[in-house]
């Protein structure tokens, strides 16, 4: 999850009560009135309880800052699918897959299958097409594709990410939160 806080440098904010005092910045480091707002992005990892405590503390700071400050939630909460699944990031050069900052342990074929579907969104592929494009041959049975799709769904912890199109094959869900990082 990422939290975005925006504050305007020319606005005056009452100082929040801090455990230890923070010194004022020297005059040469103070902001001019014509500068853009200050944006702070904080990534929070860990359990939901820790995130909620951090968000509560941020909201208190924003409340103390006044009406011109705001907190916007992004990342896993705001940009996720209805099931709450975090974004999946695929890096083809490093052959890594991350979901919500956590490394996914995918086999070579599972990774290749997910990458192929991510690079061809909204397209339905038959089992024979997947065997040709992902496996590189058609010398195995169509059941091989079914088994790998099933294992991939389990490892992704999202059975609806790869959709079965009955009588045709498989496709990536329209709202699949997958990003392929091309460098």
Image (tube, grey):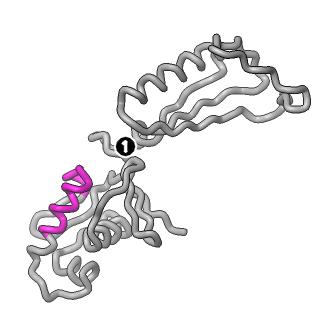
What crowding class fits label 1: few (fewer than 14 Cα within 10 Å), some (14-19), or many (20 or more)? Answer: some
Quarter placement of the C terminus = bottom right
Which residue does the image show at 24% across and 81% down from the upper left? 135
Magenta-highlighted residues: 146-161
Residue 5 sits in quarter: top right
- Give the vertical position of 76 relative to 155 (above or below): above
User: Residue 150 magenta-drawn?
Assistant: yes
Left or right of residue 30: residue 182: left
Residue name at image x 38 percent, y 69 percent = 119
Q: Secondary structure at mark 1?
A: loop
Residue 35 x/y as whole percent:
80, 34
Q: In the picture provided, is 179 more to the left or to the right than 138?
A: right
Give the image location of residue 127, x and y in percent: 16, 75
Q: Which is nearer the eye, 131 or 166?
A: 131
Q: Is residue 12 left or right of residue 183?
A: right
Outermost residue on the right side: it is: 28
Q: Is residue 138 left or right of residue 117?
A: left
As displayed, is residue 151 above or below residue 92? Answer: above
Predominant SS of the magenta segment:
helix
What residue does disc 1 label? 80
> What residue lies at 87% left-to-right and 26% top-to-bottom?
26
The residue lying toward the viewer, choosing from 5 and 109, is 109
Quarter placement of the N terminus: top left
Magenta-colored stretch includes residue 36: no
Residue at image location 20% in from the left, 66% down from the top: 170
Picture layout, residue 5 above or below residue 93: above
């Amino acid at each position: 999850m990422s939290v975005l806080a925006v504050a305007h440098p020319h606005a005056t904010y009452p100082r929040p009560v801090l455990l230890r005092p923070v010194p004022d910045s020297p005059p040469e480091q103070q902001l001019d009135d014509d500068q853009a707002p200050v944006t702070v992005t904080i990534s929070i990892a860990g359990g939901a309880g820790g995130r909620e405590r951090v968000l509560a503390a941020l909201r208190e700071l924003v409340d103390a800052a006044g009406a011109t400050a705001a907190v916007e939630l992004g990342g896993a909460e705001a940009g996720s699918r209805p099931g709450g699944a975090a974004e999946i990031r695929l890096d083809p050069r490093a052959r890594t897959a991350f979901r919500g900052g956590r490394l996914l342990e995918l086999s070579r074929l599972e990774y290749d299958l997910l990458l192929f579907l991510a690079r061809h969104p909204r397209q339905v592929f038959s089992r024979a097409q997947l065997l040709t494009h992902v496996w590189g041959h058609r010398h195995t049975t169509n059941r091989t594709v079914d088994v790998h799709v099933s294992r991939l769904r389990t490892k992704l912890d999202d059975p609806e990410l790869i959709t079965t199109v009955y009588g045709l094959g498989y496709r990536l869900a329209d709202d699949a939160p997958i990003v392929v990082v091309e460098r």
